[in-house]
Image (cartoon, rainbow, N blue to C red):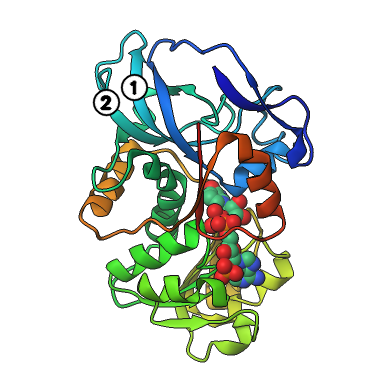
Amino acid sequence: MKAVRYHAFGEPDVMRYEDVDRPAPGPGQVLVKVASTSFNPADAGLRVGGAQELFPVELPHIPGVDLAGTIVELGSGVNSHAVGDRVIGYIPLTSPGAAAEYVVAPAEVLTAAPTAVLLSDGAALPVAALTARQALFEHGGLKAGQRVLVNGAGGGVGTMVVQLAKRAGAVVIATASPRSASVVKNFGADQIIDYTVAPVHEAIVDPVDLVINNVAAAPEEIDRLTPLIIDGGVGVSVPHITVKGDDARNVNWHLMGVRSDATQLAELVALVDQGALKLDITGRFPLTETARVHANAQAGKVRGKVLLLP
Ligand SMILES: NC(=O)c1ccc[n+]([C@@H]2O[C@H](COP(=O)([O-])OP(=O)(O)OC[C@H]3O[C@@H](n4cnc5c(N)ncnc54)[C@H](OP(=O)(O)O)[C@@H]3O)[C@@H](O)[C@H]2O)c1
């Protein structure tokens, strides 16, 4: 089969489109014919070798942790799925990924793909939506009526955070530059702060109950968001940044690592099928263009979700 692989860590041009043996599913796994994967910043982090301590990948490595496709073979012991099922999932970060014609995935991380959108569009959902859901409700404890600041609302995660927070009855304040402002507004943000004009900590007047930070900025930049949070409130940093809380006011920041969760993903799929959760797909490229997509992301030219298709 064809796959994208890198044999050494480095810049986007380490990625090669090449022939690779088609994998076979082991116990509890399935073989999926890939319809698409999507770019996530984590793919770039793994590619440069910066995450080897936490998430060691073996070289050569096939990137791509978001998956949409059709099951073509079952490993032993798999009863939850059948050949022909159209599925999506967040597959393990360190396993061979979905930037390939076929990928082996644990059956337990897969759920039925949305039916209201193209199968290939389903790969825009797993990582971004699971991260948003877990950030807001598991780490942030969001409740209806609360004010939430979504810092970095224009990205894959941010657009999901805005929609899920609004749906949960929150007042949503979002930072976005002009290229993302209308999408973020349409997804339900009550107030948009153009971070290219004014720093967010200067633009917010009334405090918020919760901050979801999606921006991988210097920690001291994100520290400036702490005074915006009410006493007893919470901050959640989606990028791995240790942010200073305020003990005197009982304001704490949580770090998170998104977890694959097929039950939660099924709920998010249902929202997509009801039209209650929109996918912000901004590009669809063949796998042969993977290096270009990584280079564009590195240059800050990517917003929303970009799909890669075999
Ligand atoms: N902990 C976890 O498990 C986990 C899971 C998923 C993602 N992440 C991390 O979370 C971060 C967000 O992921 P993502 O997929 O949403 O990334 P993304 O799609 O690449 O986000 C890009 C967006 O970031 C916005 N942005 C950049 N600089 C900004 C700034 N100074 N202020 C406000 N917005 C800014 C831009 O918005 P505009 O278009 O408005 O300019 C851009 O659209 C990444 O660092 C990723 O690695 C962590």
Can residue 13 be spotted in the picture? yes
Residue 20 in the figure: left or right of residue 263:
right
Residue 167 in the figure: left or right of residue 200:
left
Q: Which quadrant holds residue 160?
A: bottom left
Q: CA distance from mark 1 to mark 2?
A: 5 Å
The label shown at residue 85 is 2
What amino acid is labelled 1 in the image?
Answer: Ile
Q: Secondary structure at mark 1?
A: strand
The structure residue drawn at horizontal position 48% and vertical position 85%, both measured from the top left corner, is 207
The label shown at residue 190 is none
Residue farthest top in this picture: 76
Q: Quadrant of the N terminus?
A: top right
The label shown at residue 71 is 1
Cβ atoms at labels 1 and 2 below 8 Å apart: yes
Identify which residue, 247 or 294, lies in the foreground: 294
The structure residue drawn at horizontal position 38% and vertical position 62%, both measured from the top left corner, is 141
